[in-house]
Amino acid sequence: MIIIELKNLLEEKKIPQDFYSLNGGLPNEAYCIGKNKGVWEVYYSERGHKSEYKKFASESEACNYFYKALVEVLKQMELI
């Protein structure tokens, strides 16, 4: 899966856009994925800090991890 496929899947599953960022950055209280200096990063952003940080060599690995992790968290919170 690549970013555009991830975006389409999240929209298809009706995951609220407030919960994530597909452009990295440091939005408040959002799960993020982005490419930084050639490395794909997945993390939770809160108050300008990255937590639960993982890095990946490929876009596909990062997208697959991001989707599974986001869905799992939202299920645990009973939001989906």
Image (cartoon, helix red, strand yellow):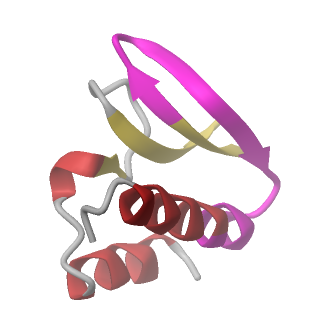
For the point 57% across and 60% down, the residue is 69
| Bounds of the magenta segment | 44-64
Quarter that holds the C terminus: bottom left
Residue closer to the observer: 11 or 38 = 11
Total marks shown come to 0
Examine the rendered structure and indicate whether residue 8 appears above or below residue 30: below
Q: Residue furthest right?
A: 57
Quarter assignment of residue 53: top right
Query: Would you say 62 lies left or right of 44 here?
Result: right
Residue lying at the far bottom in this picture: please name it.
Answer: 12
Q: Residue at x 54, y 22 (%)?
A: 50
Q: Residue at x 64, y 33 (%)?
A: 52
**Could you tell me residue 3's position as x and y percent?**
47, 70
Quadrant of residue 31 in the image? Answer: top left
**How far from the left and from the top, in percent, is residue 79?**
24, 62
Q: Is residue 37 visible?
A: no
Establish if 6 lies above or below 34.
below
Q: Is residue 33 left or right of residue 42?
A: left
Rendered location of residue 55, percent (x, y): 75, 43
Q: Above or below — where is 69 with respect to 61?
A: above
- Does residue 24 belong to the magenta stretch? no
Residue 3 falls left or right of residue 63: left
Q: Which residue is pictured at 82% across the width and 55% down the height?
A: 57
Residue 60 visible in image? yes
- The quarter of the picture where the N terminus appears is bottom right
Q: Nearer the viewer, residue 36 or 8?
A: 8
72 with respect to 80 (left or right): right
Give coordinates of residue 11: x percent, y percent.
22, 78
